[in-house]
Image (cartoon, helix red, strand yellow):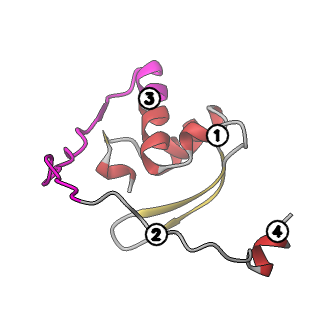
Amino acid sequence: CLKQYLSTEEKIENLCQILTDIGLHVENFFSLKKDYLIELNIPPNRGEIMSHYGIARDLNIALKFRGFKSKMRKLPSVFIFKKDLDIKNINFLIKKGATPLFKLQRY
């Protein structure tokens, strides 16, 4: 999925080494038919990289810093098909009742 966001010609071994260097420990990587699967350990203090896009963004910066060619691809734009939504009635009925047992036992 990183290919959707990042354009680079670097080999997978080099990318895994760079990911490890920037704090994302690469446990293993597997070769699939047309792609690779990278198994990462993401530290809890790195919430900004909990997605493919976040990992690609950090990898892009690390590649450029090391002098490699790399470019982030443009994300598809979001299309909102109903900007002027007309809500006639904003009165909602909320039924009052006992709290379910599973909600009470959560804490």
SS of the residue at dot 4? Answer: loop
Which circle, 4 or 3, is nearer the viewer?
Answer: 4
SS of the residue at dot 3? Answer: helix
Q: How crowded is mark 1: few (under 14 residues within 10 Å), some or many (20 or more)?
A: some
Which segment is the magenta one?
61-88
The verdict on residue 80 being magenta is: yes
In three-dimensional space, the C-alpha distance between marks 3 and 1, rounded to whole angstroms, equals 13 Å
Q: Which residue is drawn at 22% across and 56% down?
A: 87
Whether pointer 2 and pointer 1 mark residues with C-beta atoms closer than 8 Å, the reply is no
In the rendered image, residue 10, in percent from the top left (x then y), is placed at 39, 41
SS of the residue at dot 1? Answer: helix
Q: Which of 47 and 84 is in front in this view?
A: 84
SS of the residue at dot 2? Answer: loop
- Sequence order check: which comes first, mark 4 or mark 2? 2
Q: Is residue 61 above or below residue 33?
A: above
Q: Which residue is drawn at 55% across and 37% down?
A: 48
| Quarter of the C terminus within the rendering | bottom right
Quadrant position of residue 5: top left
In the rendered image, residue 64, in percent from the top left (x then y), is placed at 40, 23
Answer left or right for 81 relative to 30: left
Whether pointer 3 and pointer 1 mark residues with C-beta atoms closer than 8 Å, the reply is no
